[in-house]
Image: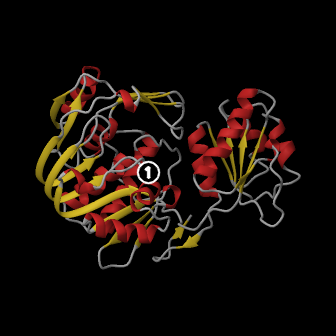
Amino acid sequence: MDIAGGLYLELCDVPQWDATFGSGGRAAAAVADLSPSSVLHTYVAPAAENGANYLKELGIDVRRHNTDTAIVFAYFHPLSRPHLEPPRSKIAANPPILVESGAILRFGFVEGDAIVRGDRVVYDPQTYHEPALFGANGSEAKCLALVINELEIRAMAGTADIAAAATCAMTSQGADVVIVKAGIRGATVFERGKAARHVPAFRSTRVFKIGTGDVFSANFAHYWAEDGMSPHDAAILASKAVATYCETRMLPPMGPQPSMVALSDLPPGPIEIVGAVDTIGRRWTMEEARFRLRELGLSVRAPALGDAPDESRAVAAVLVIAEGMDMLVDARMRPVMPPDLPVVVLYEGGDRLAATVGAAYANLTITDDFASSLYLVAWAATPQRIGTQGRLIA
């Protein structure tokens, strides 16, 4: 498989992450075991040499196009908006890369572009800010699949209706398949002439979000464009690969485990956040948790931040940010929270808290990772239902 995508430096403070991947580099690493003959077409700056060498060690054929500008994406945590250095206005455009092959995965670039021509092509634009149409630069595909998130396809199609936007993308770009990613709700496969089909997200105990879209697109492209699987089957395997990557941060990801639990596409119920706000750091964490959960599309209230209770809707799950609370958590919660209510506790101080609250709550999860705590409480607030094969979907 041929992959056209960026090779960028990535930094994250919490949890610590210092790597050179970018969309193209990560995609190539993600399918290194599945597609050992893969070729990566990318721009390589001197600062990205170590990343290019690592990919070569994985067996990737790196077709380099030299550039002077090293591009860095820096995150505070995996769900924060990345800081791009240098700013887009300071990044010079390099000559486009030309790729011709049978199976191609094309990403959008920051510092250039890729003109691709192939039999089966997957296009992931990687931006909601004026995303380029696939054929606008002369790219061609006998069979085209778009992998895109809800924000991107709304911007591309100019409508908030996802189904209508997918139909518009098929018409305007000649796409045969459109995969619309919806975060905690999984994804939807739109295929020309067929009914839309849901693809679930799969549960992981930790969630590392940097690059999950790259892993999805790479695995989907391998299974659909290279192996010839149906779009839905390919997307299922891609979703499982994402869960494995979220759990381990390993590239290439380990194979999907048979015990993986598919998550429901039902909308999560309301979430309440409990935590201390007596220092600027503790208040910031509370504010950030509320903001990011709302950005994921959830209904969230935090009484400590002045949110009024909604008596008409029962809380479906609780997120406890234990910093500054410690032994007070159980005393504050027990009078108002039923013992079977799902409770997720963000606690970075070791195991002491489990003994404090564990006996009082039957449905308790404790994590030391901020981003993971948000996904775990979102999943905890999601209603369960029985899947089509009689299997419980959480």
Q: Say if residue 191 shows up in the picture.
A: yes
Position above or below: 167 against 139: below
Position above or below: 307 against 230: above
Quadrant in the picture for residue 175: bottom left
- On the image, numbered disc 1 is attached to which residue? 243
22 vs 233, nearest the viewer: 22
Q: Secondary structure at mark 1?
A: helix
x, y percent for residue 312: 81, 67
In the image, is 194 to the left or to the right of 365? left
Quadrant in the picture for residue 114: top left
In the image, is 304 to the left or to the right of 254? right
Question: Looking at the picture, which amino acid does disc 1 mark?
Answer: Ala
x, y percent for residue 284: 70, 33
In the image, is 277 to the left or to the right of 211? right
366 vs 275, nearest the viewer: 275
x, y percent for residue 75: 49, 32
In the image, is 33 to the left or to the right of 235? left
175 vs 50, nearest the viewer: 175
x, y percent for residue 218: 29, 50
Residue drawn 53% across the image and 47% down it: 205
139 vs 196, nearest the viewer: 139
Q: Say if residue 231 shows up in the picture.
A: no
Residue drawn 48% across the image and 68% down it: 161
Residue drawn 39% across the image and 58% down it: 156
Q: How is the image coloured?
A: secondary structure
Position above or below: 96 against 132: above
Mark 1 Cα shell of 10 Å, populated few (<14), some (14-19), many (≥20): many
Residue closest to the far right: 335
